[in-house]
Image (tube, rainbow, N blue to C red):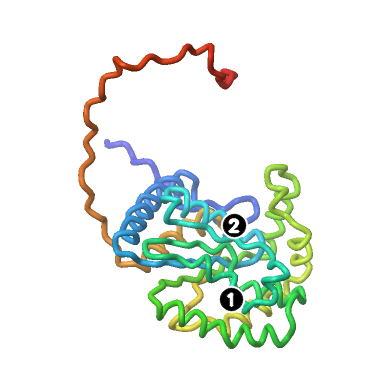
Protein backbone atom coordinates (compact mmCIF):
# COMPACT_ATOMS: atom_id res chain seq x y z
CA UNK A 1 0.00 0.00 0.00
CA UNK A 2 1.30 3.50 -0.77
CA UNK A 3 2.39 5.52 2.21
CA UNK A 4 0.10 8.30 3.29
CA UNK A 5 1.40 11.67 2.14
CA UNK A 6 2.35 13.95 5.03
CA UNK A 7 -0.43 16.29 6.07
CA UNK A 8 0.17 19.82 4.82
CA UNK A 9 0.66 22.33 7.60
CA UNK A 10 -1.79 25.24 7.63
CA UNK A 11 -0.39 28.54 6.40
CA UNK A 12 -0.94 30.10 9.81
CA UNK A 13 -0.50 28.99 13.39
CA UNK A 14 -1.96 30.51 16.53
CA UNK A 15 0.59 31.77 19.05
CA UNK A 16 0.25 31.77 22.82
CA UNK A 17 -1.63 35.07 22.68
CA UNK A 18 -4.26 33.67 20.34
CA UNK A 19 -3.03 35.60 17.29
CA UNK A 20 -2.89 33.65 14.03
CA UNK A 21 0.49 34.23 12.37
CA UNK A 22 1.86 33.23 8.98
CA UNK A 23 4.39 30.44 9.38
CA UNK A 24 8.00 31.59 9.13
CA UNK A 25 8.97 29.29 6.26
CA UNK A 26 6.02 30.39 4.13
CA UNK A 27 6.65 34.03 5.05
CA UNK A 28 10.29 33.89 3.97
CA UNK A 29 9.54 32.18 0.65
CA UNK A 30 6.70 34.58 -0.17
CA UNK A 31 8.76 37.59 0.85
CA UNK A 32 11.56 36.49 -1.50
CA UNK A 33 9.06 36.17 -4.33
CA UNK A 34 7.45 39.54 -3.65
CA UNK A 35 10.78 41.33 -3.29
CA UNK A 36 11.79 40.05 -6.72
CA UNK A 37 8.55 41.53 -8.04
CA UNK A 38 9.38 44.81 -6.29
CA UNK A 39 12.66 44.96 -8.23
CA UNK A 40 10.77 44.42 -11.51
CA UNK A 41 8.25 47.06 -10.46
CA UNK A 42 10.96 49.62 -9.69
CA UNK A 43 12.63 49.03 -13.06
CA UNK A 44 9.26 49.59 -14.75
CA UNK A 45 8.70 52.78 -12.71
CA UNK A 46 12.08 54.07 -13.88
CA UNK A 47 11.53 53.04 -17.49
CA UNK A 48 8.08 54.67 -17.65
CA UNK A 49 9.07 57.77 -15.68
CA UNK A 50 6.33 57.17 -13.13
CA UNK A 51 6.20 59.14 -9.87
CA UNK A 52 5.04 57.14 -6.87
CA UNK A 53 4.18 58.22 -3.32
CA UNK A 54 3.21 55.64 -0.71
CA UNK A 55 1.97 56.92 2.66
CA UNK A 56 2.19 54.70 5.75
CA UNK A 57 0.18 55.72 8.79
CA UNK A 58 -1.12 53.94 11.88
CA UNK A 59 -0.70 53.65 15.61
CA UNK A 60 2.68 53.36 17.27
CA UNK A 61 4.11 49.81 16.98
CA UNK A 62 1.63 48.90 14.24
CA UNK A 63 4.44 47.73 11.94
CA UNK A 64 4.83 50.60 9.48
CA UNK A 65 8.62 50.64 9.73
CA UNK A 66 8.86 46.89 9.22
CA UNK A 67 6.97 46.86 5.93
CA UNK A 68 8.80 49.97 4.69
CA UNK A 69 12.09 48.20 5.35
CA UNK A 70 10.97 45.07 3.45
CA UNK A 71 9.85 47.18 0.49
CA UNK A 72 13.01 49.29 0.31
CA UNK A 73 15.58 46.55 1.06
CA UNK A 74 15.77 45.09 -2.47
CA UNK A 75 15.35 48.40 -4.29
CA UNK A 76 17.89 50.82 -5.71
CA UNK A 77 18.17 53.55 -3.03
CA UNK A 78 18.99 56.16 -5.67
CA UNK A 79 15.41 55.89 -6.92
CA UNK A 80 13.53 54.79 -3.79
CA UNK A 81 13.64 57.10 -0.77
CA UNK A 82 12.16 56.94 2.70
CA UNK A 83 10.80 60.24 4.01
CA UNK A 84 10.52 60.25 7.80
CA UNK A 85 10.30 63.87 8.88
CA UNK A 86 10.86 64.95 12.47
CA UNK A 87 8.95 67.66 14.24
CA UNK A 88 8.78 70.96 12.32
CA UNK A 89 11.29 73.71 13.00
CA UNK A 90 10.18 77.13 14.22
CA UNK A 91 10.49 78.41 10.65
CA UNK A 92 8.50 75.50 9.21
CA UNK A 93 5.72 76.17 11.70
CA UNK A 94 5.14 79.52 9.98
CA UNK A 95 4.97 78.01 6.46
CA UNK A 96 2.02 76.64 4.53
CA UNK A 97 1.38 73.35 6.30
CA UNK A 98 2.12 71.08 3.31
CA UNK A 99 5.22 73.04 2.29
CA UNK A 100 7.81 70.97 4.14
CA UNK A 101 6.52 67.77 2.52
CA UNK A 102 6.67 69.06 -1.05
CA UNK A 103 10.50 68.88 -1.43
CA UNK A 104 10.31 65.15 -0.70
CA UNK A 105 7.92 64.40 -3.56
CA UNK A 106 9.32 62.22 -6.36
CA UNK A 107 10.72 63.17 -9.74
CA UNK A 108 10.24 60.92 -12.78
CA UNK A 109 11.25 57.33 -12.09
CA UNK A 110 11.27 57.74 -8.31
CA UNK A 111 9.40 56.11 -5.43
CA UNK A 112 8.98 57.86 -2.07
CA UNK A 113 7.81 55.97 1.01
CA UNK A 114 6.45 58.31 3.69
CA UNK A 115 6.93 56.89 7.19
CA UNK A 116 4.19 59.12 8.57
CA UNK A 117 3.24 62.13 6.52
CA UNK A 118 1.14 65.28 6.38
CA UNK A 119 -1.47 63.26 8.28
CA UNK A 120 0.43 64.07 11.48
CA UNK A 121 -1.92 67.04 11.76
CA UNK A 122 -4.97 64.79 11.88
CA UNK A 123 -3.32 62.39 14.35
CA UNK A 124 -0.64 63.30 16.85
CA UNK A 125 -1.04 67.07 16.46
CA UNK A 126 -4.79 66.83 16.93
CA UNK A 127 -4.66 64.47 19.93
CA UNK A 128 -1.70 66.10 21.69
CA UNK A 129 -2.91 69.66 21.11
CA UNK A 130 0.03 70.68 18.90
CA UNK A 131 -2.29 72.54 16.50
CA UNK A 132 -5.25 74.84 16.96
CA UNK A 133 -8.85 73.95 16.11
CA UNK A 134 -8.67 76.35 13.17
CA UNK A 135 -5.49 74.69 11.84
CA UNK A 136 -7.06 71.24 12.22
CA UNK A 137 -10.27 72.24 10.45
CA UNK A 138 -8.28 73.84 7.63
CA UNK A 139 -6.26 70.64 7.22
CA UNK A 140 -9.37 68.49 6.86
CA UNK A 141 -10.68 70.87 4.18
CA UNK A 142 -7.43 71.31 2.26
CA UNK A 143 -5.92 67.83 2.45
CA UNK A 144 -8.23 66.28 -0.19
CA UNK A 145 -7.50 69.25 -2.45
CA UNK A 146 -3.75 68.89 -1.91
CA UNK A 147 -3.87 65.19 -2.78
CA UNK A 148 -6.01 65.87 -5.83
CA UNK A 149 -3.35 68.32 -7.05
CA UNK A 150 -0.68 65.65 -6.60
CA UNK A 151 -2.64 63.11 -8.60
CA UNK A 152 -3.58 65.60 -11.30
CA UNK A 153 0.13 66.33 -11.72
CA UNK A 154 0.68 62.62 -12.49
CA UNK A 155 1.78 61.34 -9.07
CA UNK A 156 0.45 57.92 -8.10
CA UNK A 157 -0.60 58.23 -4.45
CA UNK A 158 -1.34 55.18 -2.28
CA UNK A 159 -2.25 55.43 1.42
CA UNK A 160 -2.02 52.62 3.98
CA UNK A 161 -3.35 52.61 7.52
CA UNK A 162 -1.85 49.90 9.74
CA UNK A 163 -4.42 48.75 12.25
CA UNK A 164 -3.28 47.02 15.45
CA UNK A 165 -5.31 45.95 18.48
CA UNK A 166 -4.62 47.49 21.87
CA UNK A 167 -3.59 44.06 23.22
CA UNK A 168 -1.03 43.52 20.48
CA UNK A 169 0.29 47.06 20.76
CA UNK A 170 0.77 46.52 24.50
CA UNK A 171 2.77 43.34 23.84
CA UNK A 172 5.00 45.16 21.35
CA UNK A 173 5.56 48.04 23.76
CA UNK A 174 6.59 45.58 26.48
CA UNK A 175 8.97 43.91 24.03
CA UNK A 176 10.54 47.27 23.24
CA UNK A 177 11.08 47.93 26.94
CA UNK A 178 12.76 44.56 27.51
CA UNK A 179 14.81 44.43 24.31
CA UNK A 180 17.82 46.81 24.32
CA UNK A 181 17.91 46.61 20.52
CA UNK A 182 14.42 48.11 20.40
CA UNK A 183 14.50 50.63 23.26
CA UNK A 184 14.98 53.51 20.82
CA UNK A 185 11.60 52.71 19.24
CA UNK A 186 9.70 53.67 22.39
CA UNK A 187 9.58 57.40 23.09
CA UNK A 188 7.79 59.41 25.81
CA UNK A 189 5.36 60.48 23.09
CA UNK A 190 4.53 56.81 22.41
CA UNK A 191 3.85 56.24 26.10
CA UNK A 192 1.55 59.26 26.23
CA UNK A 193 -0.24 58.13 23.06
CA UNK A 194 -0.85 54.77 24.77
CA UNK A 195 -2.86 56.60 27.40
CA UNK A 196 -4.98 58.27 24.73
CA UNK A 197 -6.16 55.23 22.78
CA UNK A 198 -9.75 56.39 22.51
CA UNK A 199 -8.76 59.93 21.47
CA UNK A 200 -6.58 58.49 18.69
CA UNK A 201 -9.43 56.23 17.59
CA UNK A 202 -11.78 59.19 17.30
CA UNK A 203 -9.16 61.23 15.44
CA UNK A 204 -8.56 58.38 12.99
CA UNK A 205 -12.30 58.01 12.33
CA UNK A 206 -12.65 61.74 11.68
CA UNK A 207 -9.60 61.71 9.41
CA UNK A 208 -11.08 58.87 7.36
CA UNK A 209 -14.42 60.67 7.12
CA UNK A 210 -12.78 63.61 5.35
CA UNK A 211 -9.89 61.98 3.45
CA UNK A 212 -11.05 58.49 2.45
CA UNK A 213 -12.51 58.83 -1.04
CA UNK A 214 -12.78 56.97 -4.32
CA UNK A 215 -10.13 59.30 -5.73
CA UNK A 216 -7.71 58.93 -2.81
CA UNK A 217 -8.75 55.94 -0.70
CA UNK A 218 -7.27 54.64 2.53
CA UNK A 219 -6.29 50.96 2.46
CA UNK A 220 -6.43 49.38 5.92
CA UNK A 221 -3.84 46.69 6.73
CA UNK A 222 -4.74 44.44 9.64
CA UNK A 223 -1.39 44.26 11.41
CA UNK A 224 -1.64 42.07 14.52
CA UNK A 225 0.25 39.46 12.47
CA UNK A 226 3.40 41.29 11.34
CA UNK A 227 4.37 38.70 8.74
CA UNK A 228 0.94 38.56 7.19
CA UNK A 229 0.65 42.36 7.22
CA UNK A 230 3.92 42.74 5.34
CA UNK A 231 3.01 40.19 2.68
CA UNK A 232 -0.51 41.56 2.25
CA UNK A 233 0.67 45.16 1.97
CA UNK A 234 3.44 44.46 -0.54
CA UNK A 235 1.16 42.26 -2.63
CA UNK A 236 -1.52 44.96 -2.65
CA UNK A 237 0.98 47.69 -3.52
CA UNK A 238 2.17 45.73 -6.55
CA UNK A 239 -1.43 45.11 -7.62
CA UNK A 240 -2.00 48.85 -7.96
CA UNK A 241 0.29 49.01 -11.00
CA UNK A 242 -0.06 47.38 -14.39
CA UNK A 243 3.70 46.90 -14.57
CA UNK A 244 5.66 44.52 -16.75
CA UNK A 245 9.22 43.24 -16.74
CA UNK A 246 11.59 45.60 -18.52
CA UNK A 247 13.75 43.98 -21.15
CA UNK A 248 17.43 44.53 -20.48
CA UNK A 249 20.50 44.01 -22.59
CA UNK A 250 22.42 40.93 -21.59
CA UNK A 251 25.58 41.80 -19.67
CA UNK A 252 28.74 40.02 -20.70
CA UNK A 253 31.94 40.50 -18.75
CA UNK A 254 34.96 41.04 -21.02
CA UNK A 255 38.25 39.30 -20.24
CA UNK A 256 40.25 40.99 -17.53
CA UNK A 257 43.06 43.21 -18.71
CA UNK A 258 46.59 42.18 -17.89
CA UNK A 259 48.33 43.80 -14.93
CA UNK A 260 51.99 43.40 -15.85
CA UNK A 261 52.61 47.16 -15.48
CA UNK A 262 51.21 47.23 -11.93
CA UNK A 263 53.03 46.23 -8.77
CA UNK A 264 50.96 46.11 -5.59
CA UNK A 265 52.49 47.89 -2.56
CA UNK A 266 53.68 45.61 0.26
CA UNK A 267 50.85 44.61 2.61
CA UNK A 268 52.82 45.66 5.68
CA UNK A 269 52.57 49.28 4.50
CA UNK A 270 48.75 49.24 4.83
CA UNK A 271 46.38 49.03 7.76
CA UNK A 272 44.06 46.01 7.73
CA UNK A 273 41.05 45.29 9.91
CA UNK A 274 42.02 42.57 12.41
CA UNK A 275 40.78 39.05 11.67
CA UNK A 276 38.70 38.35 14.77
CA UNK A 277 36.46 35.90 12.95
Q: CA distance from mark 2 to mark 1?
A: 38 Å
Q: Which residue is mark 1?
A: 98
Between residues 89 and 77, which one lies in front from this camera angle?
89
Q: In the displayed structure, would residue 254 be above or below residue 192?
A: above
Between residues 112 and 19, which one lies in front from this camera angle?
112
Q: Which residue is mark 2?
A: 19
Left or right of 259, for residue 18? right
Q: Position of residue 172 (x, y in %)?
A: 68, 54
**Residue 162 in which image quadrant:** bottom right
Q: Position of residue 155 (x, y in %)?
A: 41, 72
At a point 30% along the width and 64% down the height, the residue shown is: 48
At a point 36% along the width and 52% down the height, the residue shown is: 39
Q: In the displayed structure, would residue 15 be above or below residue 260?
A: below
Between residues 21 and 60, which one lies in front from this camera angle?
60
Residue extending farthest front: 261
**Residue 5 in which image quadrant:** top left
Element marked by disc 1: helix
At a point 75% along the width and 49% down the height, the residue shown is: 177
Between residues 103 and 7, which one lies in front from this camera angle?
103
Q: Position of residue 214 (x, y in %)?
A: 44, 83
> Exactly how many numbered labels are in the figure?
2
Q: In the displayed structure, would residue 149 be above or below residue 231?
A: below
Q: Quadrant of the C terminus?
A: top right
Amino acid sequence: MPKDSPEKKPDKKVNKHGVARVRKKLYESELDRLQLELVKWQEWVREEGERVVVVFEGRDAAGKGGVIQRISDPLNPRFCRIAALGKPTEREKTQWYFQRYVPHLPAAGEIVLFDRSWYNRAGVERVMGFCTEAEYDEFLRSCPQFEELLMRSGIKLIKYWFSVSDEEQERRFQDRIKNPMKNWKLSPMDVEARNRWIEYSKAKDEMFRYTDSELSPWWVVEADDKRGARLNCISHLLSQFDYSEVEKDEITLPPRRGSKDYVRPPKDEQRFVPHKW
